[in-house]
C-alpha cells in the first residue's frame, strides 16, 4: 500500500532535509510536497488583500475584529492545506507514496492536524513530529539562504507564542529530536518504522481470570471516549454494564472459539488486550475458511498502537491461522483516527461502515 508521511515541526528544525533524505533512502519512491511551496502557489490565485468571509471557527467578530481575523486565517490555511492534500491524494491514487513537510502553528494547529488526518484517513499515514531546541534553530537560521523572509522573530514565535512541535505532540505516531539525530538517521528510523517505545518492555500472553478487572477498566475508558462521539449508540451503561462485561469476559476465557491475549508491562501493569472469535462466514459468502472477528481491542494509550497493538494483533493472527482462519475482521469507530491509521498500516482494508441516526 502507498504510504503518506507527514512531518511537522518549526522552521529550521530540519523537516525539508529529512523529507529529501526519505526520498533518497527509499529509492525515490516518495514524492516530496512542501506547505511553503503550496502557500506560495496559493498566493498566485488570490489577489492581494483578498479576504475570506467564511466563518470557519469560533464566533462572530468581537469589537476589535480578532475573532474574524482568526477565522479568516484558518480559512486561508485550510484552502492551502486542501491544495496540498488534494495533490497528495492524486499522487497516492497514481501509486506514488508521499512525504509532506509542514508547520502547523497558531491557535488552529490541532484543527489543521485533524483536517490532514481526516483527509488521508484511508491511506497508510504516519504523523511525525520534529523537535529542535530554539537555540539550535536560531543558530541554523544564520546559515539559511533559501528563505530570505525567514526572520529570528518568526523562529522565536514558533516556540514562544505557538509551539509548533508541542501543539500536536499527543497526536504524533512518533517524534524525533533533530539536534540529537541527523536527517539521515531520522529518515532511516521513519522508513524502518523504528518507533520510540513509551515503555521499555512488555510481554503478550494468554489472558487469565485475574486479568478481567483490568480488561474491563481499559474497555470502559474506550467506551467513555466513544460515548462523546455517539452518545446514544455508545451510551455507557454504568456499573451494571461493567458487571455484565466482567462476567462475559470471564465466560469467554472458557470458550474454545475465543482467543484472548493480554499485554503486560515489565511492572506487571496491563496495557492492552485483544479478543477474537473464530466463526464461520454466513452461507452466502465463502472466504475459504474461518473468520477471526475482533471487536474488543484496546491499548492504554493511543501511542501504543504501533507497539503493543501490533504485538497483540500479530499474536492473535498467528494463533488464528493455526486454527484454520483465513481472514480477520476488526471493528473500529469511524472517529478513532489513531486506531484506524494503525489498522490501515497493518494492511487491513475497510470493508463496511455503519451509519447511525435517530428513528
Image (spheres, rainbow, N blue to C red):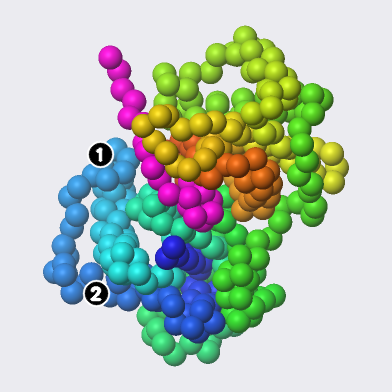
Element carrying mark 1: loop
Residue at 18 percent of width and 74 percent of height: 44
Which numbered circle lies on residue 41? Answer: 2
Q: Is residue 185 left or right of residue 351?
A: right
x and y percent of residue 188 in the render?
61, 76
Residue 356 located within the stretch drawn in magenta: yes
Element carrying mark 2: helix
x and y percent of residue 348 in the render?
48, 50
Residue at the spot of label 1? 60
The part of the chain drawn in magenta is 339-359
Dot 1: few (<14), some (14–19), or many (≥20) neighbours within 10 Å? few
Viewer-side residue, 181 vs 285: 285
Residue at 85 percent of width and 42 percent of height: 267
Dot 2: few (<14), some (14–19), or many (≥20) neighbours within 10 Å? few
As drawn, the residue found furthest toward the left would be 47
Q: Is residue 4 left or right of residue 321?
A: left
x and y percent of residue 351 in the render?
38, 42
Instruction: Indicate which disc, 2 or 1, sits on the residue closer to the N terminus.
Output: 2
Residue at 16 percent of width and 62 percent of height: 50
| Quarter containing the C terminus | top left
Question: Magenta stretch: dominant SS?
Answer: loop
Q: Where is 329 relative to 311, above or below?
A: above
Residue at 67 percent of width and 45 percent of height: 322
Amino acid at each position: 500500500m502507498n504510504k503518506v508521511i507527514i512531518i511537522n515541526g518549526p522552521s529550521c528544525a530540519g523537516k525539508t532535509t529529512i523529507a529529501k533524505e526519505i526520498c533518497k533512502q527509499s529509492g525515490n519512491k516518495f514524492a516530496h510536497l512542501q506547505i511553503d511551496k503550496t502557500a506560495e502557489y496559493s498566493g498566485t490565485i488570490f489577489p492581494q488583500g483578498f479576504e475570506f468571509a467564511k466563518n470557519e471557527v469560533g464566533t462572530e467578530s468581537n469589537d476589535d475584529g480578532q475573532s474574524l481575523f482568526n477565522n479568516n486565517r484558518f480559512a486561508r490555511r485550510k484552502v492551502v492545506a486542501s491544495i496540498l492534500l488534494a495533490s497528495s491524494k492524486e499522487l497516492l491514487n497514481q501509486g506514488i507514496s508521499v512525504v509532506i513537510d509542514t508547520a502547523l502553528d497558531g491557535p488552529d494547529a490541532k484543527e489543521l492536524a485533524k483536517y490532514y488526518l481526516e483527509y488521508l484517513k484511508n491511506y497508510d499515514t504516519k504523523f511525525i513530529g520534529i523537535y529542535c531546541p530554539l537555540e539550535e534553530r536560531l543558530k541554523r537560521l544564520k546559515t539559511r539562504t533559501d528563505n530570505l523572509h525567514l526572520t529570528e522573530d518568526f523562529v522565536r514565535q514558533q516556540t514562544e507564542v505557538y509551539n509548533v512541535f508541542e501543539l500536536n505532540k499527543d497526536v504524533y505516531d512518533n517524534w524525533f529530536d533533530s539536534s540529537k539525530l541527523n536527517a539521515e538517521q531520522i529518515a532511516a528510523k521513519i522508513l524502518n518504522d523504528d518507533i520510540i517505545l513509551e515503555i521499555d518492555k512488555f510481554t503478550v500472553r494468554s489472558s487469565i481470570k485475574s486479568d478481567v478487572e483490568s480488561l474491563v477498566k481499559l474497555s470502559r475508558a474506550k467506551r467513555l471516549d466513544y460515548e462523546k462521539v455517539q452518545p446514544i449508540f455508545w451510551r455507557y451503561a454504568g456499573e451494571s454494564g461493567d458487571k455484565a462485561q466482567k462476567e462475559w469476559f470471564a465466560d469467554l476465557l472458557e470458550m474454545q472459539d475465543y482467543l484472548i491475549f493480554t499485554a503486560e508491562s515489565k511492572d506487571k501493569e496491563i496495557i492492552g488486550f485483544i479478543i477474537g472469535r473464530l466463526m464461520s462466514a454466513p452461507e452466502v459468502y465463502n472466504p475459504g475458511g474461518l473468520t477471526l472477528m475482533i471487536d474488543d481491542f484496546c491499548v492504554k494509550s493511543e501511542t501504543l498502537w504501533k507497539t503493543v497493538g501490533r504485538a497483540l494483533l500479530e499474536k492473535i493472527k498467528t494463533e488464528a491461522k493455526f486454527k484454520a482462519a483465513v481472514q480477520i475482521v476488526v471493528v473500529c469507530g469511524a472517529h478513532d483516527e489513531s486506531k484506524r491509521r494503525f489498522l490501515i498500516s497493518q494492511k487491513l482494508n475497510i470493508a463496511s461502515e455503519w451509519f447511525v441516526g435517530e428513528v
